Amino acid sequence: MDIAYDGTDFAGWARQPGLRTVQGLVEDALSKQPPGLSVPRSVVVAGRTDAGVHASGQVIHFDVVPGQRGRIEVDSLGIPDLERMCFRWNRYLPGDVRVLAAQVAPDGFDARFSAVRRHYRYRVSDAPWGVDPLRRNHTLAWNRPLSVSRMNEASAALLGLQDFAAYCKAREVGTTIRELQRLEWTRTGPHALEVHVSADAFCHSMVRSLVGALLMVGDGRRPIDWPEAVLASRTRDSAVAPAHGLTLEAVDYPPDAELAQRAAQTRATRSPQP
């Protein structure tokens, strides 16, 4: 299932007791399907976004158990009419969450572990007066002039397979080794900038930590080689940019025949290049 959401009024993706979350609303909508399909209480997501983070290309998967035919139209193989089901799901969901498409997943598909890369975009305004009011929920207001060339020079040193412990929120388990494939700043208007960030995967707060460090380079408060020095130190020492400027835009997957192999590879512990 492909879904999109405005993260402004959500406490993140993951279901949390007493809080409004994307996962909670999606799973509740799935549970309200009419007879003919049994769905689980939990779904698997490509990327667990934090509170306030948006998504235009989030991907989830869940296993279903076909039941007796009810009001859902099915074909000769018993596959449900997914277009009609998407319509039903969107009727149950509020306007800040939309189901864009759904399909029967190929064998071996895992929304999280089969992914080969994720793509994020972070938007910034360096206008002295702040940010366009119509874009304030999706763009960070930065009241200092920013240099795209300085930020791109600093970004280049962070690319590749590296240990991003200095740019990740500490956790007791899990690796912080990631392959950062793209980190590129562009100016899209007189006071509008955006950075495109792509990697095989991201650890907690990694994108926003990278953005926070690079913004301090862009406005001249840190030297160009500072983000690289922070990376080498493996010590968390950078500002974390606010969540509302960040959007998960797409998730890439390999050909169907390679999905299971990719999932197994991703689960294995990553190791840095010599």
Image: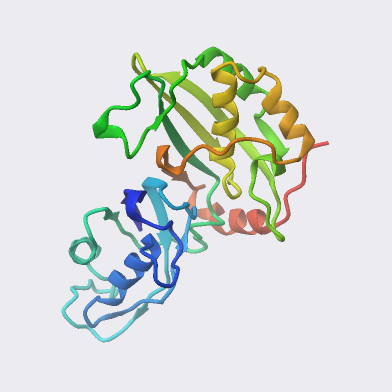
Asked whether 160 or 64 is in front, the reply is 160
Q: At 53% from the left edge and 36% from the top edge, which residue is drawn?
A: 198
- Apparent side of residue 149 relative to residue 4 in the rendered image (left or right): right
Asked whether 13 or 201 is in front, the reply is 13
Q: At 75% from the left edge and 27% from the top edge, which residue is drawn?
A: 229
- Tell me the quarter of the image containing the C terminus: top right
- Apparent side of residue 113 relative to residue 143 in the rendered image (left or right): right
Measured along the vertical axis of the image, is residue 208 above or below residue 42?
Answer: above
Residue found at the very far bottom of the displayed protein: 68
Q: Residue 43 location in percent, x, y?
A: 43, 67
Inspect this view and state whether residue 199 appears: no
- Apparent side of residue 86 relative to residue 248 in the rendered image (left or right): left
Q: At 75% from the left edge and 40% from the top edge, which residue is drawn?
A: 235
Q: Residue 240 location in percent, x, y?
A: 56, 39
Measured along the vertical axis of the image, is residue 77 above or below residue 249?
Answer: below
Measured along the vertical axis of the image, is residue 270 above or below residue 60?
Answer: above
Inspect this view and state whether residue 228 appears: yes
Task: Using the rendered view, name the quadrant where residue 212 is placed.
Answer: top right
Q: Residue 175 location in percent, x, y?
A: 71, 52
- Apparent side of residue 227 relative to residue 138 in the rendered image (left or right): right
